[in-house]
Image (cartoon, coloured by chain):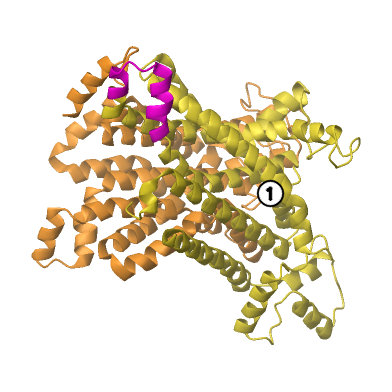
Chain colours: A orange, B yellow
């Protein structure tokens, strides 16, 4: 189960290639020519590989106490050990499975909701749009993380059996609104294009027009909101686990921090118990954010910082205008 | 005016949705607050009558139809009654919340103000000097910093400045042992000292958003003809930057203000928890730890109310800044 969802990150880019059919090689060139996208994809791919190859990377069981507790980093345990004597490196690499898995499931589910709400509300307009965009906007203004905390705390006390599934559902439920609004705005403009009018004239069903005609034309935007949701989901998941709302028996990045905080690792100077997990979250999320900035630059050439412009705008301005025309 | 009334209507609907979530969610879950309280105090030999009385007290009497419960719940809310806390029995939830709210508002308000000011200025400057080394270096660094989880940034700051260097206090909202709350310099100084690290945590976490929004919008504005015209007239560079470009580029930042506010509030919850800062976030954390449903719900409701009102205020500002919105043409 973990394996299939974790390979999904590279698939995301290959779907884009598939959509473009003949232009595949040129899109690949664009992706590799934009340094932000290549760095971001590299970082994400690294984490996916680490999560998949966890048993190859460490001989230790992440949940078993192997030695004395709270040993500082050494050659045998490169990230040290936890308070219970578990190998920290094993916890990090196995924890990547849980953290990436929950984040990925939440982001996929959330993206499905975003596409459904965003596209249907914009395509149909009128009363349907009024109702759906009211729902979108209400979820948009309600603070997400507090709502997630309320949901998770109520749900986790009720059903302790599968907390990770509960966590993914909570994150899904609280994260879809922003992307839905972005997609709705884009669909509003696409709806007026000729190919949509043509499809309507040939008698295609609304369902087909929305998902087979309009959706492929904004797949880059869907990818970008998917990544944005992924960033939110990973961050919020780690936060909820840090608050003790996750499955405290399994290793994951949030749980590592939860136990580090509970064992007062901070005050006693055991920095290795909280530095690696936090850095992993930060590097992964920064990598994802980089992919998004890259997509932004591809979509909006004005943002590219290709050649430096010295001092006065007046001289740089002309170059810009040539580029745009 | 009609526009504002419509927006006000929308926020009332959003508030109603928050209240209704609060009502429905606990009732969908197995168990109820009365059971949770009994488990909390390790009660034994509770008679059926006592249990029923308890359910009535928490507003979950099974003999009362669900619509009546809902009506009673909304009615109680309108009278400012949020129920009784379980973990701090028998305090009213509203009392606990009114003690914590000022701390959170102070923390979030200061952080948002500083972050907006600094971030927008940096964004403006790096867009103006686009392509220079700091335009290339600053955004990636800020992106990395904003990807760091809030609570982890807080932990790192505590470790470096609190534990190792011992420059700042890392616990509570003021020095509870040596100063007493009131309008005196000792207390205010102590509050400022205690708020320093939490505010820095929030500012670091939110800075990147402001910088990037402002940079991207400023770059678009800089290619407008009136900026070129201003330069051609030979106006001082600073005047073109502030009065011509930045002034028009700032609108998207004001729009994203409302969305970012929800994120700052979320961040402040986690920051408060790490710093044991006596705000709503800390109250929410304690409520979650103690299975205190009434307090959890009360916290959520207050946070939702605060975020919604702040959103409405930012829309008022936006209407004031952008005449197109007033005309309803946007």
For disc 1, the chain is B
State yes or no: residue B245 in magenta: yes
**Percent position of residue B102, x then y:** 72, 48
Q: Is residue A45 above or below residue B328?
A: above
Q: Is residue B66 above or below residue B298?
A: below
Q: Nearer the viewer, residue B124 or B266?
A: B124
Residue B64: image location, x then y, percent:
67, 86
- Asked whether, in this view, residue A316 is left or right of residue B135, the answer is left
Which quadrant holds the C terminus of chain A? top left
Residue B261: x %, y % from top left = 55, 46
- Say which quarter of the image contains residue A90: top right
Query: Furthest residue to the right?
Result: B178
State the residue lying farthest toward the top.
A310
The image quarter in which residue A109 lies: bottom left
Say if residue B300 shows up in the picture: yes
Counting every numbered tag in the picture gives 1
Kindly state the secondary structure of the residue where label 1 is placed.
Answer: helix
Q: State left or right for residue A297 relative to residue B16.
A: left
Q: Residue at x 63, y 79 (%)?
A: B71
Q: Residue at x 65, y 50 (%)?
A: A249
Foreground pick, B325 / A148: B325
Which residue lies under the disc numbered 1?
A: B281
Provide the major secondary structure of the magenta segment.
helix
Q: Which residues are magenta?
A: B229-249
Q: Residues within 10 Å of mark 1 (few under 14, many from 20)?
A: many
Q: Is residue B160 magenta?
A: no
State which quadrant residue B155 falls in. top right
Does residue A102 appear in the picture of this structure? no
Front-lying residue, B291 or B327: B327
């Amino acid at each position: 189960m973990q394996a299939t969802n974790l390979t999904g990150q590279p698939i995301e880019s290959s779907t884009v290639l598939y959509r473009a059919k003949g232009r595949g090689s040129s899109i690949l060139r664009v992706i590799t020519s934009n340094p932000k996208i290549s760095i971001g994809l590299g970082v994400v791919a690294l984490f996916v590989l680490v999560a998949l190859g966890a048993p190859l990377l460490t001989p230790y069981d992440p949940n078993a106490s192997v030695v004395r507790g709270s040993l500082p980093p050494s050659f045998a345990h490169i990230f040290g050990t936890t308070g219970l004597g578990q190998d920290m490196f094993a916890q990090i690499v196995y924890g990547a499975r849980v953290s990436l898995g929950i984040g990925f499931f939440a982001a996929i589910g959330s993206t499905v909701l975003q596409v459904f709400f965003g596209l249907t509300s914009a395509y149909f307009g009128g009363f349907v749009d009024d109702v759906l965009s009211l729902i979108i906007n209400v979820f948009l203004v309600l603070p997400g993380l507090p709502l997630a905390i309320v949901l998770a705390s109520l749900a986790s006390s009720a059903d302790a059996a599968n907390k990770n599934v509960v966590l993914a559902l909570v994150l899904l439920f609280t994260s879809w609104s922003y992307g839905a609004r972005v997609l709705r705005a884009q669909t509003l403009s696409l709806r007026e294009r000729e190919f949509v009018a043509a499809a309507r004239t040939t008698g295609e069903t609304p369902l087909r027009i929305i998902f087979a005609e309009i959706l492929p034309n904004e797949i880059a935007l869907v990818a970008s909101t998917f990544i944005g949701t992924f960033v939110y989901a990973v961050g919020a998941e780690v936060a909820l686990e840090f608050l003790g709302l996750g499955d405290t028996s399994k290793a994951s990045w949030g749980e590592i921090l939860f136990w580090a905080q509970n064992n007062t690792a901070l005050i006693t100077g055991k920095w290795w118990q909280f530095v690696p997990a936090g850095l992993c979250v930060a590097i992964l999320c920064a990598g994802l954010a980089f992919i998004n900035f890259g997509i932004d630059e591809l979509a909006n050439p004005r943002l590219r910082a290709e050649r430096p412009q010295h001092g006065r705008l007046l001289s740089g301005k002309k170059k810009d205008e040539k580029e745009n025309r | 005016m009609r526009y504002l009334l419509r927006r006000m209507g929308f926020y009332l609907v959003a508030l109603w949705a928050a209240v209704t979530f609060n009502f429905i969610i606990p009732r969908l879950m197995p168990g109820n607050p009365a059971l949770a309280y009994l488990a909390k105090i390790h009660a034994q030999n509770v008679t059926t009558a006592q249990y029923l009385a308890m359910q009535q007290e928490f507003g979950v009497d099974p003999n009362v139809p669900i619509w009546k419960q809902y009506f009673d719940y909304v009615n109680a809310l309108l009278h400012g009654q949020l129920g009784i806390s379980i973990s701090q029995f028998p305090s009213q939830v509203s009392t606990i919340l009114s003690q914590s709210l000022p701390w959170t508002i102070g923390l979030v308000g200061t952080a948002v103000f500083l972050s907006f000011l600094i971030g927008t200025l940096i964004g403006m400057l790096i867009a103006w000097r686009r392509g220079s080394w700091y335009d290339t270096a600053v955004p990636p660094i800020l992106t990395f910093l904003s990807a760091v989880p809030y609570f982890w940034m807080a932990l790192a700051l505590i470790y470096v400045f609190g534990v190792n260097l011992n420059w700042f206090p890392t616990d509570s909202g003021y020095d509870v042992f040596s100063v007493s709350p009131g309008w005196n310099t000792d207390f205010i100084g102590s509050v400022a000292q205690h708020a320093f690290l939490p505010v820095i945590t929030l500012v670091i976490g939110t800075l990147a958003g402001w910088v990037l929004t402002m940079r991207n919008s400023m770059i678009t504005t800089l290619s407008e003809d009136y900026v070129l015209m201003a330069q051609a007239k030979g106006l001082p560079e600073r005047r073109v930057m502030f009065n011509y470009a930045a002034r028009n580029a700032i609108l998207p930042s004001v729009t994203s203000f409302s969305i970012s506010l929800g994120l700052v509030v979320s961040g402040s919850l986690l920051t408060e928890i790490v710093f044991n800062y006596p705000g709503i976030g800390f109250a929410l954390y304690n409520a979650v730890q103690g299975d205190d449903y009434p307090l959890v719900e009360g916290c959520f409701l207050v946070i939702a109310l605060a975020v919604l009102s702040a959103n409405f205020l930012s829309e008022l500002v936006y209407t004031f800044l952008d005449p197109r919105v007033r005309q309803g043409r946007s």
